[in-house]
């Protein structure tokens, strides 16, 4: 752990020092991306007819028992690691996959749900927030944007019960899985080796985060959530 002393004020009004302690951790992003890849691949297999609709409950259980808990964990760790974009994205993904899994379990195989369609379209819009805010990490932002696209297309299928939209959702799910697998590998290698072995396309502050010194990492710390008085 490392500490950073910031100007503070003691109760008696005398000048003092407040110490903020930072705790290093491994990047949780690869874990979240791998959970995403598993869920989107499992449901894509059902949507494309590779797996019978009667076995969709297996994909639902994978989303509920594997993807959603892992992404919730990554969301918490993302906020603790001072990355609100990763925390927000993984939180939305975790909740959305939990809803998809739950609805699939309680619905008859192969049926569409207009209510789920509305939820998915709303989740797609929600995913655009971290996708746009996370543009300095282009690869991660691409995963978020493709997740929004996948949810939107699946949402349209749930609203229309169209076979064409169902196929499009499956294709979008596979494309998302490929990009998520790449992102997981790229960020895992970067964290393990201390440098990018595969392109992750970091820009601006995201590049400084891995190339800067401790002073760069703690710049503006006094104004961050958890240190400042209010969110």
Image: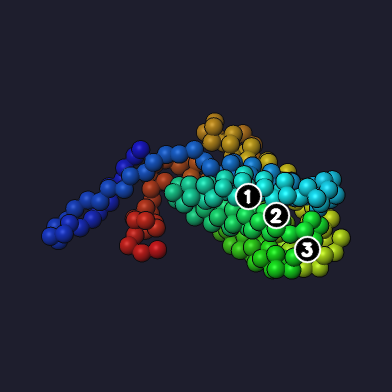
Q: Are marks 3 and 1 in contact (CB under 8 Å)?
A: no
**Residue highlighted by disc 2:** 105
Which label's residue is closer to the chain start, 3 or 1?
1
Q: CA distance from mark 1 to mark 2?
A: 10 Å
Q: Quadrant of residue 192?
A: top right
Crowding near the residue tagged with mark 2, few <14, some 14–19, many ≥20 C-alpha atoms within 10 Å: some
Q: Is residue 182 above or below residue 166?
A: above
Which residue is farthest top?
193
Chain-order first, disc 1 or disc 2: 1
- On screen, residue 99 above or below 183: below
Q: Work out which quarter of the rendered image holds the N terminus and state it.
A: top left
Could you say whether the residue bearing mark 1 is in a helix, strand or loop? helix
Residue positioned 70% across, 64% down in the render: 116
Estimate how packed mark 1 is, as few (under 14), some (14 to 19) or many (20 or more) residues with alpha carbons within 10 Å. many
Q: Position of residue 162 (x, y in %)?
A: 85, 64
Determine crowd level at label 3: few under 14, some 14-19, many 20+ residues with C-alpha closer than 10 A: many
Label number found at residue 64:
1
Label 2: element kind: helix
Residue beneath disc 3:
112
For the point 73% across and 59% down, which residue is it? 107
- Seen from the viewer's position, the closer of residues 49 and 33 is 49
């Amino acid at each position: 752990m490392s500490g950073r002393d910031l100007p503070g004020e003691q109760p008696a009004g005398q000048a003092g020092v407040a110490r903020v302690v930072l705790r290093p951790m491994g990047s949780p992003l690869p874990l979240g991306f791998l959970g995403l890849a598993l869920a989107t691949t499992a449901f894509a297999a059902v949507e494309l007819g590779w797996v019978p609709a009667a076995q969709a409950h297996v994909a639902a259980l994978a989303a509920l028992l594997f993807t959603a808990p892992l992404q919730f964990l990554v969301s918490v760790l993302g906020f603790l690691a001072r990355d609100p974009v990763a925390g927000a994205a993984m939180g939305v993904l975790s909740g959305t996959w939990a809803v998809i899994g739950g609805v699939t379990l309680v619905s008859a195989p192969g049926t569409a749900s207009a209510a789920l369609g509305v939820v998915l379209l709303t989740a797609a819009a929600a995913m655009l927030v971290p996708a746009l805010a996370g543009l300095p990490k282009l690869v991660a932002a691409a995963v978020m944007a493709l997740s929004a696209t996948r949810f939107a297309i699946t949402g349209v299928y749930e609203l229309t019960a169209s076979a064409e939209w169902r196929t499009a959702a499956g294709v979008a799910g596979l494309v998302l899985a490929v990009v998520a697998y790449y992102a997981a590998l790229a960020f895992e290698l970067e964290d393990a080796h201390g440098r990018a072995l595969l392109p992750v396309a970091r820009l601006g502050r995201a590049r400084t985060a891995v190339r800067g010194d401790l002073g760069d990492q703690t710049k503006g710390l006094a104004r961050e959530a958890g240190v400042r008085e209010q969110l």
